[in-house]
């Protein structure tokens, strides 16, 4: 029996440094026989909504009968969920076998060049190799960071490039304006692809995407949100119509029909390229899709507990919209943890009018976490409302216990601020 832990190897601290650039990934995949060349892709970039958009697209492709790979990050519960085929996580035995294969070539690369692939570059290589070995017809691939220099961008022209909603995030790496960030994300656009873009909030983002597509001779399709009609949540589903056609999604956030419309246009673009994805498969895929940690009701109550991976001001703003929509007039207690390099003050401001109380806890990502005490201080400075309790808990279990007490049986506990905390919330429940 081989004494090798693939997850520990990929997460080895020595190669966790993020170094944008494609050279190492190209070298590694070339040594592996270029598994990406045996695959077709839908490539998805953006700041908010790209994960759930990927889930919708992959679900519909499965419904159409295609063997579908899905590569996303970060994971919520299990490491293996980042690499899926037809909705199933990569089996541990396959993860072991493929990672050993990748390690062999990564070690040879380091010995010859002095460069070792980073954590995400290793993940990308493992994913592409697994999808190729699994005989995937098509892969829905989420960009890790940015787009132009992200390791997933070693693929040739995707069938469809999808640009989700763009906002300010990772400004220290991608640029300090929405236009600059959009230029990086539009770097996934390649000649020969179709492009589908969310109707961006900032004209500079729209211009950057149009310019990148124009340089590659690619047409751009933008969803027509004026034909999107969203109805109130009914039980555990949200009905909506797009272009006069009825749809239903199990993802309850008020923003999810917009993400679904983006996915619908991407799927219709695939159909124009010859993929057999009919309207029936699209509707089934939208209805069946799920995505953990996005305005997800994890406990019906009392009190109701939801988790949301919103980790930037734009994500917090749509979270506030969803709370007003799904839980109007309810007492909301926020259980919050954040990373120190996020704009957490703007996140607090986006939801502050809804918070009847706050419980702060330190994020489980020790390297980048803001302390619960530091977060509580920032909330006190931003909220400035008399009589609003703002407390600090030593761990997630006690934070959840206290948040439930503060919410009461008829209230709502909303845990948000970091995708890294979703698994901790589930453990606490």
Image (cartoon, rainbow, N blue to C red):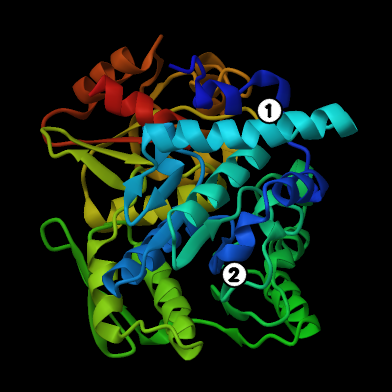
Q: Which residue is mark 2?
A: 201
Would you call the spot at circle 2 few (<14 residues within 10 Å), some (14-19), or many (20 or more)? few
Q: Is the Cβ of the residue at disc 1 closer than 8 Å to that at disc 2?
A: no
The structure residue drawn at horizontal position 84% and vertical position 27%, both measured from the top left corner, is 111
On screen, residue 102 versus residue 250, left or right, reads right
Q: Earlier in the sequence, mark 1 or mark 2?
A: 1
On screen, residue 280 versus residue 84, left or right, reads left
Q: Which residue is mark 1?
A: 16
In front of the other: 274 or 327: 274
Check the image and name the residue furthest to the top.
394
Where residue 395 appears, x then y in whole percent?
Answer: 38, 12
The structure residue drawn at horizontal position 13% and vertical position 39%, both measured from the top left corner, is 300
The structure residue drawn at horizontal position 24% and vertical position 82%, both measured from the top left corner, is 280
The image quarter in which residue 9 lies: top right
Where residue 375 appears, x then y in whole percent?
Answer: 53, 23
Would you call the spot at circle 1 few (<14 residues within 10 Å), some (14-19), or many (20 or more)? some
In front of the other: 383 or 369: 369
């Amino acid at each position: 029996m081989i004494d090798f832990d693939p997850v520990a190897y990929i997460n080895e601290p020595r190669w966790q440094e993020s170094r944008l650039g494609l050279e190492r990934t190209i070298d590694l995949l070339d040594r592996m026989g270029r598994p990406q060349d045996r695959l077709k892709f839908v490539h998805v970039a953006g700041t908010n909504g790209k994960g759930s958009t990927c889930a919708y697209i992959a679900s519909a492709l499965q419904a159409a009968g295609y063997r579908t790979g899905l590569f996303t990050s970060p994971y919520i519960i299990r490491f293996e969920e980042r690499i899926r085929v037809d909705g199933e996580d990569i089996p541990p035995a396959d993860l072991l076998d493929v990672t050993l294969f990748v390690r062999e070539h990564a070690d040879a690369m380091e010995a010859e060049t002095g460069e070792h692939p980073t954590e995400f570059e290793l993940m990308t290589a493992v994913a592409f190799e697994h999808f190729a070995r699994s005989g995937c017809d098509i892969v829905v691939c989420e960009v890790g960071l940015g787009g132009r220099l992200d390791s997933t961008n070693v693929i040739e022209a995707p069938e469809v490039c999808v640009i989700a909603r763009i906002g300010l995030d990772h400004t220290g790496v991608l640029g300090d304006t929405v236009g600059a960030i959009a230029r990086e994300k539009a770097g996934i656009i390649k000649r020969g692809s179709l492009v589908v873009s969310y109707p961006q909030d900032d004209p500079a983002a729209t211009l950057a995407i149009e310019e990148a597509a124009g340089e590659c001779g690619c047409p751009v399709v933008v969803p027509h949100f004026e034909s999107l009609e969203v109805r109130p949540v009914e039980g555990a589903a949200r009905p909506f119509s797009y272009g006069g056609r009825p749809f239903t999604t199990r993802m309850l956030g008020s923003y999810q029909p917009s993400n679904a419309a983006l996915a619908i246009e991407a799927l219709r673009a695939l159909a124009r390229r010859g993929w057999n994805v009919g309207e029936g498969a699209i509707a089934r895929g939208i209805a069946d899709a799920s995505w953990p940690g996005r305005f997800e009701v994890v406990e019906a109550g009392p009190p109701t507990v939801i988790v949301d991976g919103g980790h930037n001001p734009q994500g917090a703003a749509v979270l506030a919209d969803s709370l007003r929509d799904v839980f109007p007039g309810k007492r909301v207690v926020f259980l919050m943890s954040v990373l120190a390099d996020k704009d957490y003050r703007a996140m607090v401001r986006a939801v502050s009018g809804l918070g009847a109380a706050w419980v702060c806890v330190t994020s489980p990502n020790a390297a980048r976490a803001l302390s619960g005490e530091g977060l509580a201080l920032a909330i006190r400075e931003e909220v400035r409302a008399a009589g609003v309790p703002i407390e600090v808990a030593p761990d997630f279990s006690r934070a959840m216990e206290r948040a439930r007490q503060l919410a009461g049986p008829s209230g709502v506990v909303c845990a948000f601020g970091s995708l890294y905390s979703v698994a901790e919330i589930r453990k606490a429940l």
